[in-house]
Image (cartoon, grey):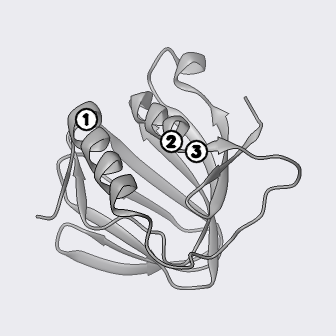
């Protein structure tokens, strides 16, 4: 399960899959470029924990806003709107999703990386059809809502 997958200009690898934890969690190491972060959103089903390895990120969780850097851990509880912004050109972090079902979204919206994974900053927004499909899948299949 440790193969890299391309995801939104960056990449990730699964450290622990939901199958390995009987669905309790998924643990993913992720590297993303600045500019591909999700908008404010709320998970109905999962808690998320972020552990920063490289780079700096701004988090908003509910009414709280703060910055985090290497060695910092951030917890985003389900049913509380949150977002993150990458403040450096890229960031590398580990995210734990509990329970782990949302891991399936990452697998669905990624592709296997061939060779050494690379970060490619966005050259503009994704096509509207892709965004519509992503939002539909996240909302219907994974219980994620966008905005407040």
Measured as percent of width and height from the top left, residue 70 is found at 64, 73
Q: Is residue 130 above or below residue 2?
A: below
Along the line of sight, the residue nearer the viewer: 118 or 127: 127
Assess disc 1: are there few (<14), some (14-19) or many (≥20) residues with their C-alpha within 10 Å of its C-alpha.
Answer: some
Assess disc 3: are there few (<14), some (14-19) or many (≥20) residues with their C-alpha within 10 Å of its C-alpha.
Answer: some
Q: Secondary structure at mark 1?
A: loop
Residue 112 lies in quadrant: top right
Say whether residue 103 is left or right of residue 47.
Answer: right
Indicate which disc residue 45 carries. Answer: 1
Q: Which residue is mark 3?
A: 110
Measured as percent of width and height from the top left, residue 124 is found at 49, 78
Measured as percent of width and height from the top left, residue 3 is found at 77, 37
Q: Is residue 112 above or below residue 20?
A: below
Q: How many marks?
A: 3
Nearer the observer: mark 2 or 3; the answer is: 3
For the view shown, which residue lies furthest in the right direction?
A: 115
- Is the Cβ of the residue at disc 2 closer than 8 Å to that at disc 3? yes
Residue 120 lies in quadrant: bottom right
Distance in Å between CA atoms under marks 2 and 1? 16 Å
Distance in Å between CA atoms under marks 1 and 3? 21 Å
Residue at 34%, 54% (x, y): give it. 129
Along the line of sight, the residue nearer the viewer: 54 or 103: 103
Residue at 83%, 46% (x, y): give it. 114
Assess disc 2: are there few (<14), some (14-19) or many (≥20) residues with their C-alpha within 10 Å of its C-alpha.
Answer: some
- Is the Cβ of the residue at disc 2 closer than 8 Å to that at disc 1? no
Q: Secondary structure at mark 2?
A: helix
Residue at 40%, 35% (x, y): give it. 102
Distance in Å between CA atoms under marks 2 and 3? 6 Å
Q: Quadrant of the C terminus?
A: bottom left
Q: Which residue is mark 2?
A: 106
Residue 107 lies in quadrant: top right
């Amino acid at each position: 399960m440790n193969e890299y997958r391309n995801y939104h200009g960056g990449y990730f690898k699964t450290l622990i899959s939901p199958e390995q934890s009987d669905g309790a969690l998924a643990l993913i190491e992720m590297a993303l470029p600045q500019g591909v972060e999700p908008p404010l959103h709320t998970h109905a089903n999962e808690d998320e924990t972020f552990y920063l390895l490289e780079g700096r990120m701004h988090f908003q969780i509910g009414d709280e806003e703060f910055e985090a850097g290497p060695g910092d851990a951030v917890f985003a509880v389900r049913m509380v709107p949150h977002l993150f912004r990458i403040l450096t050109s890229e960031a590398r972090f580990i995210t734990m999703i509990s329970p782990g079902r949302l891991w399936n979204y990452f697998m669905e919206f990624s592709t296997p990386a061939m060779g050494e994974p690379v970060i490619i900053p966005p050259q503009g927004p994704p096509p509207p059809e892709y965004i519509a499909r992503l939002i539909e899948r996240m909302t219907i299949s994974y219980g994620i809502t966008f905005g407040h």
